[in-house]
Amino acid sequence: MTILFHDDFTEGLRVRSPKARTDGPWALRPAGALTAGDGIARTTDAGLLVEPTGTDPDTGRPAFVVPPDGEPLDHLRWAAFGPSCPTGGATVTVSATLSAEPLGEAGDDVPDGAGALVVLDRDAGLVLDFALTGGRVWALYGRVPGPDGTRGGFSYSVPLAKRGPLDTHRCSLVVDTAAASARWFLDGTEMFSVEGLGLALPEEVRADSTSPGPLGLVRPTALVPGLALICDRPHGQGLRLTVGALSVTGEVAS
């Protein structure tokens, strides 16, 4: 087994900066006018803790920022992406210890607020996630549509298990690049799998959204790990994401 990337966040989130930290492995994604996204990361005894940048005026708790009228809402309110890890035809495992605590009135659907472990194949637009709401763990599987219909797109959210708002979980995504398959392991137990990465799921699995265009099988040659706060419906609620450690490992079948 080869360690492709590991971060225990003892030095906080080491964000790459052209002037201050050229060797930082993490890059932040903007969300609308928020150039570093709607999240503040800091180190605690439990690991990396990420909270929204806004504040509920009634409670003083962290809350997602509601964009001003006319500004499109980016459902990735905060996202940090690590280095691109070449797969070399290996089976790659991306794992992290996660907890997600809702703050304020939030439903148990991902659009209402979730913390996520993200795995991307940027070239193919492939998205594989674990998402934690206050009461559930979800598998997210999607493909970003290409420009002008050059590639179709879809997104699925599949509930995996119930959880408590303070529970901590070991989340592992195992991607067999040769077989074009992925498996979601929650606390050591396989909970969901996709055979035929890049293709839509069987018709009996309801998609959250679809976009027309051609689709093809994906055997990732590089995978990018990431972390995210997700919210499509900010209304004063927030979410506290805690990450104990994150690792990317590769193993070539004998």
Image (cartoon, helix red, strand yellow):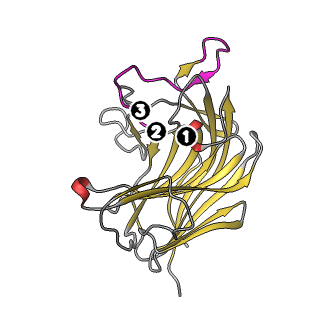
Screen quadrant of the N terminus: bottom right
The picture places residue 227, in percent across and down from the top left corner, at 52, 46
Measured in 3D between alpha carbons, the distance from the residue under mark 1 to the one under mark 3, in whole angstroms, is 12 Å
Which one is earlier in the sequence, the residue at label 1 or at label 3?
3
The picture places residue 131, in percent across and down from the top left corner, at 59, 49
**Element marked by disc 3:** loop
Type of the residue with mark 2: His
**Element marked by disc 2:** loop
Relative to the observer, which residue lies in front, 92 or 210? Answer: 210
Within the magenta stretch, is there residue 53?
no
Within-10-Å neighbours for mark 2: few <14, some 14–19, many 20+: some
Measured in 3D between alpha carbons, the distance from the residue under mark 1 to the one under mark 2, in whole angstroms, is 8 Å
**Chain part drawn in magenta:** 56-77
Q: Residue visible at 33% across and 61% down?
A: 152
Type of the residue with mark 1: Pro
Within-10-Å neighbours for mark 1: few <14, some 14–19, many 20+: some
Within the magenta stretch, is there residue 62?
yes
Q: Which residue is mark 3?
A: 73
| Prevailing SS of the magenta stretch | loop
Which one is earlier in the sequence, the residue at label 1 or at label 2?
2
Q: Quadrant of residue 27?
A: top left
Residue 83 lies, with reference to residue 176, above or below; the image says above
Does the image show residue 240?
yes
Relative to the observer, which residue lies in front, 18 or 176? Answer: 176
Relative to the observer, which residue lies in front, 7 or 230? Answer: 230
Q: Which residue is mark 2?
A: 75
Lateral position of residue 81 relative to residue 70, left or right? right
Q: Residue visible at 32% across and 59% down?
A: 212
Q: Which residue is mark 1?
A: 111
The picture places residue 11, in percent across and down from the top left corner, at 55, 39
Residue 198 lies, with reference to residue 82, above or below; the image says below
